[in-house]
Image (cartoon, rainbow, N blue to C red):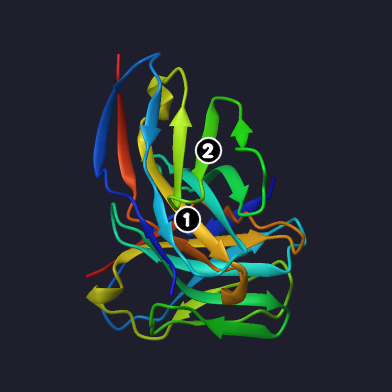
Amino acid sequence: EADIYQTPRYLVIGTGKKITLECSQTMGHDKMYWYQQDPGMELHLIHYSYGVNSTEKGDLSSESTVSRIRTEHFPLTLESARPSHTSQYLCASRPGHRYEQYFGPGTRLTVT
Amino acid sequence: AQKITQTQPGMFVQEKEAVTLDCTYDTSDPSYGLFWYKQPSSGEMIFLIYQGSYDQQNATEGRYSLNFQKARKSANLVISASQLGDSAMYFCAMRVFNAGNMLTFGGGTRLMVKP
């Protein structure tokens, strides 16, 4: 089972601010993912990474960016937050030899 | 393109009874897998069970079993002996080999267990 951490858990921020959502995992998983989820709705993949210096955009268009400088760390950045970014953001990882993804606790972002 | 459909937005079940959550999928790829995740009100996604398209037997994990009917393209989750702690959202998801094994999620089913 993966240990995967996200901070902050909750964030309320004003429009136009730059924010970074942190995601770290301690299991050495190569593959990491970011999902966006509106309350009670399905998850949508917004970014993924197959390893250090590898990042790709997912199915859902997002104004966020990601980086993968270290295996264990996969932060997501919004340069200028907008109310439309209000959502829950879930980070996940998986080892290369298994298919199931393990999720962090999520960050609930509210942009006012 | 891959698609997952969960037709039950919400369900009630009496404590200690079994319940089946429906999931149908659509893909033309012969190599794929189906997952079920549980999402309590706290928000985290908890992996429950996985079934690969080539697996001969239906997957089981404790009180969870996956009723995989390939010809009907269904992968229903059966929870036996429901507990109050089972109250949560349940999401069915699919990975497809030719789509990089990314997960596509269904819209979820909210299960409420009555005491």
In this view, the residue in front, B69 or A87, is: B69
Coordinates of residue A28 in the picture (x, y in percent): 77, 62
Of tags 1 and 2, the one toward the viewer is 2
Q: Position of residue A104 (x, y in %)?
A: 55, 54
Is residue B56 or residue A71 the one in the foreground? B56
Q: Quadrant of the N terminus of chain B?
A: bottom left
Looking at the rendered structure, the kind of residue marked 2 is: Leu
Labelled pair 1, 2 in contact (Cβ < 8 Å)? no
Q: Residue at x 61, y 54 (%)?
A: B53
**Residue placed most toward the observer, B37 or B85:** B37
Q: Using the image, determine if residue B83 lies above or below residue A70.
A: above
Query: Quick one: B67 or A42, which is closer to the camera?
Result: B67
- Say which residue appears at 49% left-offset and 48% top-offset: B45
Q: How far from the left and from the top, in percent, is residue A111?
A: 27, 70
For disc 1, the neighbor class at 10 Å (few under 14, some 14 to 19, many from 20) is: many
Query: Where is mark 2, residue-wise?
Result: B66
Q: Amino acid at mark 1?
A: Ala
Q: Secondary structure at mark 2?
A: strand
Q: Which residue is mark 1?
A: B93
- Chain letter behind tag 2: B
Residue B17 vertical position relative to residue A61 in the rendered view, above or below: above
User: Which image quadrant for residue B90?
Assistant: top left
Find the distance from the CA under tag 1 to the CA under tag 2: 13 Å
Name the side, left or right, on which B107 lies relative to A30: left
Is B75 displayed left or right of A103 in the figure? left
